[in-house]
Image (tube, helix red, strand yellow):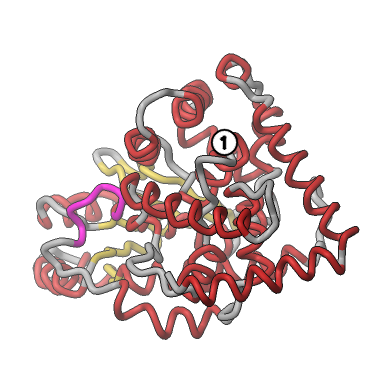
Amino acid sequence: MDKDLLRKHIKTYSKCHTEKAAEYMTDLKDRQDRVVYYQSWTRDKLLQMKEEDLFDYIGRLWAMLIWGNKRYVVEKLIQENKFDDLKSNLSRLIWDQDDIQVRWDSFRSEVKGMGPAMMSEILCHVHPTKHMIWNRRAYVGLRYLGVSSLPKYNYQCDGEKYVELCKVAEQIAEELRINGIIDATLLTVDYFIWDELQVEDNLTQVIKSESEKNMEISAGRLITKEFIHNEIRDNISDIGQWLGFSTRMEAKVAEGSVVDTVWEATIGNMGRIIYVFEVQTKGSIDSLILNLLKSLNNPAVQGVVAVSDEVQLEKIKKHAESVGDLGKKLKYWNYKEVMQNHEALSFVYESINKLGLVPQGF
């Protein structure tokens, strides 16, 4: 990390706080209010949480800015995870005494629909001296400071990497304290990153400059981690929601066919149309082909899509060519395009939702 560059921005940040004291106090109060609210959710209180409480708990997060209909997102969280299981996993993530690396990886493997941005934001609000907020803005800021080996995509941010990131954030907090912001925590670091370090806020430029380096994963390694499979699956679900579809993950679409993600739409009173997505990470390609073939037994299924890396997509294509009509109907989507499209769309929706064109609860 370039400490000289960091100190330069800290001086500017400190000067702005002096010149704009009222604005600083507003930010400070917001910070304190968030900490008080999330710390009030003790282990026992979380386990007794009602569904309406979860809407408020999740809806307050900055990570929810990309969603216009927050209630729909929370309802899907409950649907995909079972409410009691979700509460138990949240409680363990926040309050258990195991190393955060262990708790982080356990939560990622157990809970669908909550990635590092949501997880780290909750952790930071509850434990602002220990845990940082990790999201796209943090990535842009730390990248500008010259921090190496940053996780651009969710699957790269496992528990070990999150611990490393928190140590970097603590270094920034210490520099803030040395330079006069004596009450600086890792939540303060987040405000500092937003105010001072968004020097490359053009997402297109970030993707252009980083996509090659960050997405270089050989076919043999792609898809050996469960996190990678789950992130691609979740991204496909998010993209479908942003395009106006109802989506489900690990959904049964026909007898003997449970697929990773479906997009579904109802056309007037005529019925449903369904698009099926299967993410090939490991295992038998023949099993994938058979699963997709069975899904076509559902007359509502209008399209089937295999998602993987270039090497495996070629293998899938060769297998599918000899399986009846499947070869003609099967489409192929490179996982790199899935992840890049997801990032671009999330940026667009966050920007639009900040305009507040549609009031919450509409």
From the viewer's perspective, is residue 142 above or below residue 246? below
Horizontal side of 222 relative to 57 (left or right) equals left
Q: How many marks?
A: 1
Q: Nearer the viewer, residue 64 or 4?
A: 4
Q: Secondary structure at mark 1?
A: loop
Q: Which residues are magenta?
A: 222-228
Q: Nearer the viewer, residue 330 or 106?
A: 106
From the viewer's perspective, is residue 248 above or below residue 325? above
Picture coordinates of residue 226, whole percent (x, y) = 26, 47
Horizontal side of 271 relative to 298 (left or right) equals right
Picture coordinates of residue 182, whole percent (x, y) = 68, 49
From the viewer's perspective, is residue 37 above or below residue 202? above
Q: Amino acid at mark 1?
A: His
Q: Nearer the viewer, residue 62 or 39?
A: 39
Horizontal side of 230 relative to 241 (left or right) equals left
Confirm whether residue 32 shows in the render: yes
